[in-house]
Image (tube, rainbow, N blue to C red):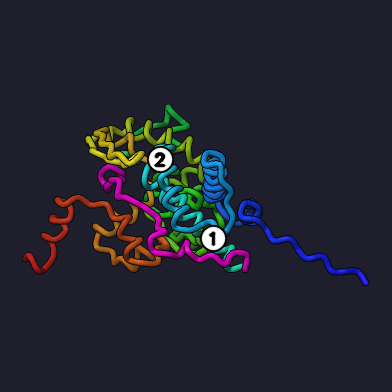
Amino acid sequence: MLKETKKKKQTFFEFIKSFIEERKNIKSDGTIKAYQNILNCLKNYCEEKKCKLDFEDIDLTFYNSFVNYLTNDLKMAQNTIGNKIKNLKVIMNEASDRGLNKNLEFKNKKFKKVSEDNDKIYLNTAELQQIYSKDLSNIKHLERVRDLFVLGCYTGLRFSDFTQIVKENILEGNKIKIRTQKTNELVVIPVHPFVKEILEKYDGNIPAPISNQKMNEFLKKVGEEAEIKEMIMSSITRGGIMERNTTEKYNLITTHTARRSFATNLYLADVPAITIMKITGHKTDKSFLRYIRISQEENANKLLNHPFFN
């Protein structure tokens, strides 16, 4: 009788590769790229440190060494490091669920995703009106990018979702019903007048999407054309050093500014947070409130209309 061959256990790096392959058809390109980035980072770390990594090596000693490598050797921004740690924890959790990993030190509270509030902007309704009303008919590629961006600003959808809207997503002409790519949630969003005009302009078929990176590049040109030129001071910790910079607001516009603008403008309009979260898909107040970008003055103006101050 033939002996049954014992299945060889996957190594740490073999598992990450298979983990990425399995998700290629169910996760966005951005998420797959992030998983590939952490894989490449871990491989480069092993080469630099002349070490090997397997599941049992992912402990607090590794964590401190890896964060130090990303901070001081690669001079990465703090939030970039935090996202790499977050994705490593996702991978370790999956390996643990499958019984491939018995080392749970990655769940230690000290094995944490580092982050900082880096002054990300939002666009208020006046600025969005400025952008939407700007005549870009003589610069067609910017006009299409602007229209896509405005769709995002008034639906609260991520780039991966607002660039995929089709006629079938429009219900009764006044609602958008779509299943989100990142969280696989079904959301229903009222159609704002700007969104209705854009959908009619393209006969229900939105402009062909371009890459996130290219759209971010063009959005800065859209913002410049629309004269979104308020001077903004921004800060970021890179390589362990705080960098401060002052720049015109249009230089800070990205595709994700759309989602942040949607949440903040609805919040300022006194729409209940729970109602906004039904659309944005945030599960906790803490994660939702990170999207709310209002100045001290805007906060005071909001309170002026509260019964307590009247």
Q: Nearer the viewer, residue 94 or 127?
A: 94
Q: Percent position (x, y) of residue 104?
A: 50, 66
Judged left or right of residue 155, residue 285 is left
With respect to residue 289, does 229 lie above or below? above
- In magenta segment, residue 275: no
Element marked by disc 1 = helix
Nearer-N-terminus badge (2/1): 2
Magenta span of residues: 99-128
**Which residue was labeled with disc 1?**
92
Q: Is residue 8 left or right of residue 223?
A: right
Task: Say whether residue 6 is visible.
Answer: yes
Question: Does the magenta-highlighted stretch encompass residue 124?
Answer: yes
Residue identifier under label 2: 76
Badge 1 density bin: few <14, some 14–19, many ≥20, Cα 10 Å: many
* Most common SS among magenta residues: loop
View extreme (bottom): residue: 1
Circle 2 SS class: loop
- The residue type indicated by label 2 comes to Met
When the figure is inspected, residue 309 is found, relative to residue 292, above or below; the finding is below
Quadrant in the picture for the N terminus: bottom right
Reply above or below: 139 against 159: above
Identify the residue at image location x=48%, y=37%: 213
**Relative to residue 214, is residue 265 drawn left or right?**
left
